Image: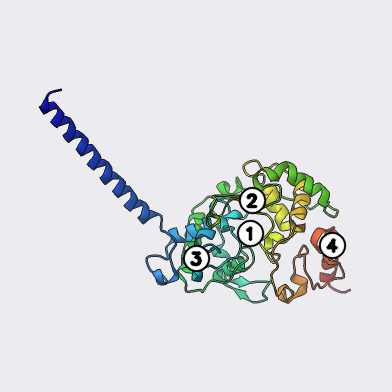
Amino acid sequence: MKPDSMRGMKLVMALCALVGLVTVAVTLAFGRASVPAPRTAAATSPGGPGATEEYGKRLIAQTSEYLGPDVPNASMRSMDSRLACASCHIGAGLEPGNLSLATAFTRYPRISPRSGGNETIQDRINGCMMRSMNGRALAEDSPEMVAMVAYLRFLSSQDAETGAAQKKAHEPAAFKTPNRAAHLKNGEQVFSQRCAACHGAEGAGLAAARDLIHGFVFPPLWGPNSFNDGAGMHRVLTAAKFVKARMPLGNPDLNDDQAFDVAAYLNSRPRPHKEGLEQDFPDRAKKPIDTGYGPYADPFSVEQHTFGPFAPIEAFYKNAQKPAK
């Protein structure tokens, strides 16, 4: 090859290398801008540039990476589990149907039977933090709380623009409670055949990476990394409705009996305990019939409230509400 040709080739190669370096640098710069890294609480102020809808979405989708027990900054460790809000609110709450977050913002403030008082959207988020995430409440003026509220407000505005027919198309099949107590052995069999492939034979979930700060691809269903016994998902009927509507993921084809039994089996397994549950539902008559801890306003046992049959409990409260003749 002639010297001039060699010089030309080297110049082209140098230019290509330079373009490549610039491209990588620009990509990384834009990547950092669009995917905010976990921050310390002092990195931004309420309503500031960090407390955005995008940050709120990431907090819900990747909660353990921002607020979990493995976060380097101890002041940001607000939960003891390694779940994400999206473990139940699939697709960061965007997925329509059961446990969608599309209308969460519009339902608050409202009276909460569990606390007996008026509950704001911030209170509701903190209820999930302390129960479903087995953690602690966030400060209402923290960037994390402000960002999650902003994201939920954004979802509600999107939902308002969605037609009724489109919403109806995504409604899950209704769950009908079997008129019997749950069979834990049957539930264990359903779990082994239909759930263990994703969630593990011991319900420990499938970690997203070796470092557990990154959470789980498929969440743990019991054990120290799961929700505690004060969470809504620890109620058998609540869990059964979710299971029938959503599980197995991508092919939710369990019938009522299977969903009922496997939900009972999951909730029979060991998990963290939340202190102070006896203070929930100051009006005992408003306590959900599948709440697995007392006290109650009825004569039924903790076991029956946990695993059924639930029809006699429902009948008791219906009769109690009838006006005296």
Amino acid type assigned to the residue bearing label 3 in the image: Val
Residue depth check, mark 2 versus mark 3: number of the one nearer the observer = 2
Distance CA(mark 1)–CA(mark 4): 27 Å
Residue under label 2, please give it. 205
Residue under pointer 1: 225
Q: Are marks 1 and 2 in contact (CB under 8 Å)?
A: yes
Q: Position of residue 77 (x, y in %)?
A: 53, 67
Q: Residue lying furthest top in this view? A: 1
Disc 1 versus disc 3: distance between alpha carbons? 25 Å
Residue situated in front as seen by the camera: 59 or 5: 5
User: Picture coordinates of residue 113 (x, y %)?
Assistant: 69, 71
Q: Earlier in the sequence, mark 3 or mark 4?
A: 3
> 10 Å neighbourhood of mark 2: few (<14), some, or many (≥20)?
many
Assign a secondary structure to mark 1: loop
Q: Position of residue 171 (x, y in %)?
A: 63, 48
Label 2 SS: loop
Tell me how far mark 2 sits from mark 3, CA to CA.
29 Å
Residue drawn at the location 68% of the way across and 64% of the way down: 228
Q: Quadrant of residue 11?
A: top left
Identify the residue at horizontal 74%, vertical 60% (top origin). Answer: 270
Instruction: Report, in whole angstroms, how far the alpha carbon at label 4 lies from the one at label 2.
Output: 29 Å
Where does label 4 land, which residue?
304
Residue at 71% in and 42% down: 194
Q: Nearer the viewer, residue 141 or 18?
A: 18
Which mark, by number, is residue 149? 3
Give, as a three-letter code, the residue at label 4. Gln
Task: Residue type at mark 1: give it.
Answer: Asn
